[in-house]
Image (spheres, rainbow, N blue to C red):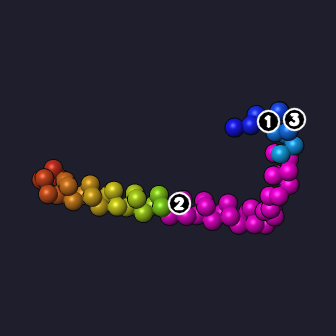
Amino acid sequence: MAKTSPAQFVREVRQEISKVTWPTRKELIVTTISVLVMSALAALFFFLVDQVIAFSIKFLLGLGG
């Protein structure tokens, strides 16, 4: 494997960064909101599933009092 000098490495990194398509502000905001909403929905789903499983276990084992 050929060794690369630090200066060459920096030049190559700058070249690659210039190829990146950066999102617009609107795309960034929409994507961020989408991620937050989907995370909240996933958290709610798993909370509800956990509650149903906990209730079922307590009911089956007679721990529900």
Of the pair 11 and 64, the residue shown nearer to us:
11
Q: Main secondary structure of the magenta part?
A: helix
Amino acid type of the residue tagged 3 in the rendering = Ala
In the image shown, does 1 or 42 lie closer to the viewer? 1
Instruction: From the image, tell me which residue sits under label 1.
Output: 4
Closer to the eye: label 2 or 1: 1
Name which residue lies at 55% across and 64% down.
38
Q: Kindly state the secondary structure of the residue where label 2 is placed.
A: helix
Q: Secondary structure at mark 3?
A: helix
Q: For residue 65, say whether it is visible.
A: no
Q: Is mark 1 in CB contact (under 8 Å) with mark 3?
A: no
Q: Is residue 40 left or right of residue 2?
A: left
Given this view, does label 1 or label 3 mark the residue nearer the observer? 1
Q: What residue span does the magenta drawing correspond to?
A: 13-41
- Residue type at tag 2: Ala
The location of residue 23, given as percent across then percent down, is 78, 62
Residue tagged 3: 7
Instruction: Please indicate whether residue 50 sits to the left or right of residue 40 in the image.
Output: left
Q: Residue 50 bears which disc, if any?
A: none
Q: Residue at x 37, y 61 (%)?
A: 48
Q: What residue sits 81% from the left and 39% below the top?
A: 9
Cα–Cα gap, marks 1 and 3: 8 Å
- Near mark 1 (Cα within 10 A), the count class, few <14, some 14-19 or many ≥20, is few
Which mark sits nearer the N-terminus, 2 or 3?
A: 3
Coordinates of residue 59 in the picture (x, y in percent): 17, 58
